[in-house]
Image (cartoon, grey):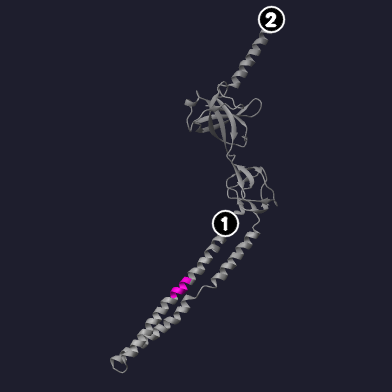
Amino acid sequence: MKNFNLQFHFFILFLFFACSNNKNDFDASGTFEAEEFIISSESNGKILELKFEEGDTLRKNQVVALVDTTQLHFKKEQLIFSMAALKTKLPDIESQLSAIEEQIKTAEREKNRIEILVNEKSVSQKQLDDIASQLEILKKQYIATKTNLTITQKSILSETNPIKSQIEQLKDQIKKSVIVNPIDGIVLARYSKENELASQGKAIYKIADLSEMTLRAFVTGNQLPELKIGQSVKVYIDQDEKNRKEYEGKIYWISSKAEFTPKTIQTKDERANLVYAVKIKVKNDGYIKIGMYGEVKF
């Protein structure tokens, strides 16, 4: 009976130390997180198509939703017609000046003819002076007409510039009505449905790239000198009640400021009040989930 009691006490002590060793078989612990993106609508209107569900894998630049653009198209067409109407008022500078140019050429030929006759003393000097004066008047008329037509043209074209700007703005709004997924990732949450009204800034869905996860762990000040950016570490998650799954991790960020230990986090020295956050990148094979606990061995 005494031998049995002795063996029983040894067995209890063994379990105690075994549990103690398992409990401290890591240097730090934390939770997994991923960089999450909330994709919002950039236009107003009814959602005509929503091509995904929660949990779907989306690719970068994939079209995932469409907001109604009917009214935007009507406004754009109206502006295009308004601009076309304004352009019909543009003066035909070339045709209007060509008539004066012909009169100038005719006057120059007549002047040359009269100059010859004056030299031959067949006509008086007054006739030459008259044609020369007429030629100067035509040239001034040409310059004045060209100036007036140019001013009129610039004035009308200046009225079309704001319309062009509005058309470009509408084109941009129409383009933004097609919602394009910005990254490869998995849809974590969907906030809108088809036929609901979208508005600028309204969240449509949340997505994250889960191919690489971040373990945010906490270390004590005593552990901090042993760590550096780029350092490889071992990361573990619980596979079942008895086994753990091991991953390769790499430290890519170390906090420069201490903070109080989160209640849900264990450190190597659980009595530590102040700890430093460390972020570790881990390639995900699909088993790591957001919010899952992980343990680190440096």
Q: Is residue 260 magenta?
A: no
Task: Please provide percent x and percent y for residue 239.
Answer: 64, 29
Find residue 187 and report its image quarter.
Answer: top right
- Residue, x 44% and y 77% (percent of image)? 145
Q: Earlier in the sequence, mark 2 or mark 1?
A: 2
Q: Is residue 236 left or right of residue 121?
A: right
Q: Is residue 55 left or right of residue 169?
A: right
Task: Please provide percent x and percent y for residue 37.
Answer: 59, 43
Residue beneath label 1, please? 172
Residue beneath label 2, please? 2
Work out how far the residue at label 2 is from the one at label 1, CA to CA, in angstroms.
Answer: 88 Å
Bounds of the magenta segment: 146-151
Q: Eyeballing the image, is 223 above or below 45?
A: above
Q: Eyeballing the image, is 118 above or below 33?
A: below
Q: Eyeballing the image, is 33 above or below 139?
A: above
The amino acid type of the residue labelled 1 equals Asp
Give the secondary structure at mark 1.
helix
Mark 1 nearby-residue class (10 Å; few <14, some 14–19, many ≥20): few
Q: Is residue 186 left or right of residue 226?
A: right
